[in-house]
Amino acid sequence: MKNETQLSAAQQKRQARAAALRARMKNFQQGRRASKLGSTELIALVGAFALLALTIAAYFLYLAPARARLVALQRERSQLQNTLREATEGTTQSENAQATVGSILQSLERFESVKLAQRGVASTAVIEELNEKTRRHNLTRAQMSFTYLEERAPAQTTTQSVSASGRQQNIFPGINISLTVDGAYANIRRFIRDIEASERFLVINGVQLEGVNESGAGAQRGALVSLRLDLSAFFRRAGAIDATGATTTAPASTSQ
């Protein structure tokens, strides 16, 4: 009797294990059936992948080239702005240079019309002024020589400083004067200062001093000095307008 009871309990245990195993298999089969996709879900999934592929293709086909073109256009705009700025600066510099040249020319015209006299009359007046200053400062004129400077034609270059007649040329007509006077040193100094203060446009090119040897009564009056003075006087060009509005005419040819 006891053996039959034990056998019945073992059978029940085996039956319970089998039932539990069958339940697990059933649940597993139901889970697999539940995990299978239907046709609708599959179509939606394929559509999503297709849309993603179209988005990526559109990016590389349209958006990326558009961005590259935008960068190129921005670079081109920057270059054009730089070119425009350089052109504007060049125009400003050119205008400033033209204004400077115009100011210089106006200053030159004012200088020529106010400071320079007509050659025909002024050349004689310069020589007379030097003689008068020599007498005023008690100097003895030992020697005076001069050469004329002809006006250089506008077409000539700066290297063409000698005319066909052999005379020297300059932008402004004038005369080169070489003057030698003797006298006391103090009188020589006053004579030079007087020339520098002249209202005429006189340019001192060179000064040379040397002592004068003398004997007899003259030696008691003090040492004498000999002055050699090289200077130039310039006059108004032919065709220039003076301060009164009159036009300067070219003087007749004068021999040296």
Image (cartoon, grey):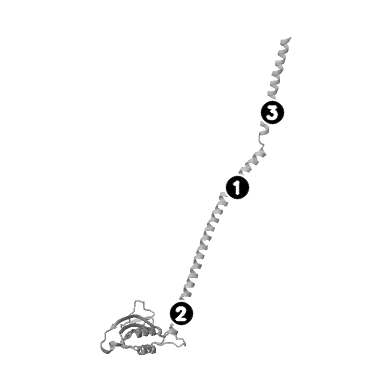
Label disc, if present, on residue 122 of the rendered structure: none
- At 48% from the left and 75% from the top, the residue drawn is 99
Evaluate if marks 3 and 1 touch, with contact meaning CB atoms under 8 Å apart: no
Q: Is residue 168 left or right of residue 22?
A: left
Q: Is residue 30 left or right of residue 195?
A: right
Residue at image mark 2: 107
Mark 3 or mark 1, earlier in chain: 3
Q: How many marks?
A: 3
For residue 41, above or below residue 124: above
- At 62% from the left and 41% from the top, the residue drawn is 46
| Residue 89 visible in the picture | yes
Give coordinates of residue 135: x percent, y percent. Answer: 35, 90
Label 2 Cα neighbours within 10 Å, binned few <14 / some 14-19 / many ≥20: few
Mark 1 or mark 2, earlier in chain: 1
Quarter occupied by residue 159: bottom left
Give coordinates of residue 224: x percent, y percent. Answer: 30, 85
Label disc, if present, on residue 27 of the rendered structure: 3
- Indicate which label's residue lies in the foreground, 2 or 3: 2
Residue at image mark 1: 55
Quadrant occupied by the N terminus: top right
- Indicate which label's residue lies in the foreground, 1 or 2: 2
Mark 2 or mark 3, earlier in chain: 3
Give coordinates of residue 212: x percent, y percent. Answer: 28, 84
Q: Nearer the viewer, residue 133 or 125?
A: 133
Q: In this view, does 20 lie to the left or right of 66?
A: right
Residue placed farthest to the top in the image? 1
Type of the residue with mark 3: Asn
Helix or strand or loop: what does disc 3 sit on?
helix
- At 50% from the left and 70% from the top, the residue drawn is 92
